[in-house]
Image: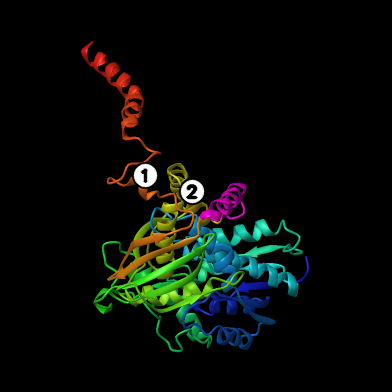
Amino acid sequence: MAKPLAVLAFSGGLDTTVILHWLRTRGWDVAAYTANLGQPDADLEAAAAKARAMGVVDAFVEDLRRELVDEFFLPVLQLHARYEGRYLLGTSIARIPTARGQMRYAKRIGGNVLVHGSTGKGNDQVRFETVYRVLQEDPAYALQDFGIYAPWKEPEFLARFGDGGRKVMTAYAIEHGIPLPSGGTDEGPPYSQDANVLHISSEGRALERPEDDHREVLLTYIARWDETPDAPERVRVHFDKGRPVRVERLDEDRRHVVTGVEVGPGESVLPVVEYLNRAGGRHGVGLVDMVESRYVGLKSRGVYEAPAHSILLAAHEDLESLVHDHRLLHEKAKRAYDVAEAVYQGKWFTQEMQSWLAANAVEQARVTGWSELRLYKGSILPVARHSPHSLYDEAAVSFDTASAEYDPQSARGFIDIQAVEQQAQMRQRRGLEGS
């Protein structure tokens, strides 16, 4: 095997900074790969500069925001995936383009060992390493002398940092003169965060007791309830074949567009996401505090901020209720749980997931129109919707008009026939009870 060139997924946070120093002191050549996923307030170029100062052979920051939003987030949104019915998968989605980008960079510079800072107790280790192994089968990404190094599963690293975690790592950084992310000597906030343009997750430490509320968390995207406006805001989200392409903020009488954003054909929907993060954040929408089941078998508690995703999901579901029939909506609701689990578990490249994506492309052909929503004090309420492909027939459904297509007198036969099976079952049950 050639001399190892480790390509580290480097955020510039405490864990990956200590890992970088640890690798360098053990004689590794290291290149630092930093993904720009739209992390709010993050100075990624400063992170790359820090890596260079610590002796890496190369440091690279790659803008993956459009890949994240258009290639991965958009189908997850359209498939209505929520893990365990609540979590919108912001971190899960982001790991796929990050790991793929890391491999793309490693192949370009001749790297042969992929390194990540995910712990051995969480889900991200599964996501990163699954993408590594799957894309190693693709000649466009395959590395020579391919290897994976995961420090949090290595005995020597665990012996040094496994008992004490961030406290021990902070002390190590101070001992070796490594710049801390906060610029000081404190341990930072009493929880761990992962952030991108889709969401912010907070977990660990002060949040590890499910019986304690999340008051420790300093929310970034979302205003706290008592800081939100005392008047609701109306937004109208326009979709073109399932893509959110325009947002209009309406005045309360719905007659005038106050402000908004629009993207053209073939353009990224990233500006829509950024606009709705701000609009939803003002009104405190998109906050979830839940206990979830990690793929590795443990329970974990997370606090999630996802205002844009929450608004877009409510709008997309609302519009689909107008253009899809009952059976499709029913099957889609069942499928959404399986899609969410696959994304959560890092199974993006399975045959099953690829078949869902193909079916989704067909389904989205009808999803054109708009949904209007009211944002107020943490709530999202769809209040109106329109589509040129609407299945809603006002004349047929109205109680005030007769319809040539629907004769109420025919309902008697319909009811009689659909009740036959249940009647037979009831007779059978009564017979058993009487015997």
- Callout in the foreground (1, 2): 1
Dominant SS in magenta: helix
Q: Which residues are magenta?
A: 347-366
Of mark 1 and mark 2, the one earlier in the sequence is: 2
Image marks 1 and 2: residues in contact by CB distance under 8 Å: no
Position of 423 with respect to 391 (left or right) is left
Extreme-left residue of the structure: 434
Location of residue 24 in the rendering, given as x and y in whole percent from the top left corner: 64, 79
Q: Is residue 76 above or below residue 235?
A: above
Picture quarter with the C terminus: top left
* Label number found at residue 396: 1
Indicate whether residue 349 is drawn in magenta: yes
Position of 291 with respect to 337 (left or right) is left
Q: Is residue 234 above or below residue 258?
A: above
* Label number found at residue 152: none
Observer-nearest residue: 327 or 16? 327
Location of residue 221 in the rendering, given as x and y in whole percent from the top left corner: 39, 76
The answer to whether one can see residue 154 in this image is: no
Give the color scheme: rainbow, by chain, secondary structure or one colour.
Answer: rainbow
When asked about the image quadrant of residue 187, the answer is bottom left
Picture quarter with the N terminus: bottom right
* Residue at 21% from the left image edge and 13% from the top image edge: 434
- Residue wearing tag 2: 338
Instruction: Describe the element under mark 1 as helix, strand or loop.
Output: helix
Observer-nearest residue: 286 or 323? 323
Location of residue 139 in the rendering, given as x and y in whole percent from the top left corner: 76, 60
Q: Is residue 241 above or below residue 47?
A: above
When asked about the image quadrant of residue 207, the answer is bottom left
Q: CA distance from mark 1 to mark 2?
A: 36 Å
Instruction: Describe the element under mark 2 as helix, strand or loop.
Output: helix
